[in-house]
Amino acid sequence: MKNILIIGASSAIASACAQRWAVQGARLFLAGRQTTRLKAVAQDLRVRGAQEIHTRKFDINNRAQHSALLSAARSALGSLDIVLIAHGTLADQTLCERDVNVTVSEFTTNALSTIALLTLIAPILEVQGSGTLAVISSVAGERGHASNYVYGAAKAAVTTFCEGLRARLFRANVRVLTIKPGFVATPLTAGIARSGMLVASPARVAGDIVRAVARGKDTLYTPWFWIAIMLAIRSTPRFVFKRMASSSAAARDGG
């Protein structure tokens, strides 16, 4: 029976992961901003077989709440076998370009808040001598696209931070899994095309995440074909990629 803390538990991917862990009889601590949604998720998980469920309203950008959340989770569950960090927003790139405050806010939500939380969680698992930190980043962090470089830069920061944290915690028998989804059909992507071969369901992505955690993987591209796609993107010469990314941005803006 696993003790699992999920941050951003009301999101589509996180709740789909929780469903799979509930079937396995996990004990779950769910944290998120939407109280009503958390209660609905918790009720569903009880039906699916979760042994124990706790919920807590939590604002990731309020750093004063971070330590209190971790204390509450440890008090309720004891040890933390898995911590899934799954919160985030999809930045409006055009708005970010027009307003520095929006840029800073989006970077804080998608990068700095995660880094701050990981900094607090790491020593807990380090002393514990076990556990898995699973953190949702994105394939958008691999290279900077003109159409979403604020979001991409934030995810790149998370990915790099997790890489260093993985090396630090390796000797303590703590695993760090960086999750890099491609396009996923969630409410977050409601304004983007949500059909086609490259768009995955939250259920498919959640299945990949749960399996990757169980297997102790370091990095997960989900669905799997993003491994090849990102290899091609990373291999594209900079002068070519610059023109491709510019064309993509022009298409976004109707140019």
Image: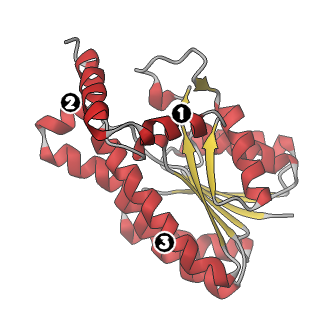
The residue carrying mark 3 is 164
Q: Nearer the viewer, residue 48 or 170?
A: 170
**Rendering coords of residue 118 (x, y %):** 49, 69
The disc placed on residue 134 is: none
- Is 31 displayed left or right of 193 in the figure? right
Label 2, label 3: how far apart the Cα atoms are = 32 Å
Tell me if I can see residue 42 in this picture. yes
At x 87%, y 54%, the residue is 25
Looking at the picture, tell me which residue is in the foreground, 40 or 114. Answer: 114
Residue 43 makes an appearance in the image: no
Query: Type of residue at label 1?
Result: Ile
**N-term mark: 2 or 3:** 2
Residue at position x 43%, y 42% in the image: 234
Q: Which of these two is toward me, 237 or 152?
A: 237
Q: Considering the numbered disc 3 on the image, is that residue within a helix, a strand or a loop?
A: helix
Please tell me in which quadrant of the rendered image residue 225 appears: top right
Marks 2/1 in contact by CB < 8 Å: the verdict is no
Find residue 48 and report its horizontal and vertical position in percent: 85, 42
Task: Indicate whether 242 appears above or below 21.
Answer: above
Looking at this rendering, what residue extends furthest in the top direction?
Answer: 254
Residue 142: image x %, image y %?
42, 46
Is 219 displayed left or right of 158 in the figure?
Answer: right
The type of residue carrying mark 2 is: Thr
Which of label 2 and label 3 is nearer to you?
A: 3
The one of 85 and 71 positioned closer to us in this rendering: 85
Kindly indicate whether the residue at mark 3 contacts the one at mark 2 (C-beta within 8 angstroms): no
Label placed on residue 229: 1
161 on left or right of 197: left
Q: What element does badge 1 sit on?
A: helix
Q: Residue at x 79, y 50 (%)?
A: 21
The disc placed on residue 94 is 2
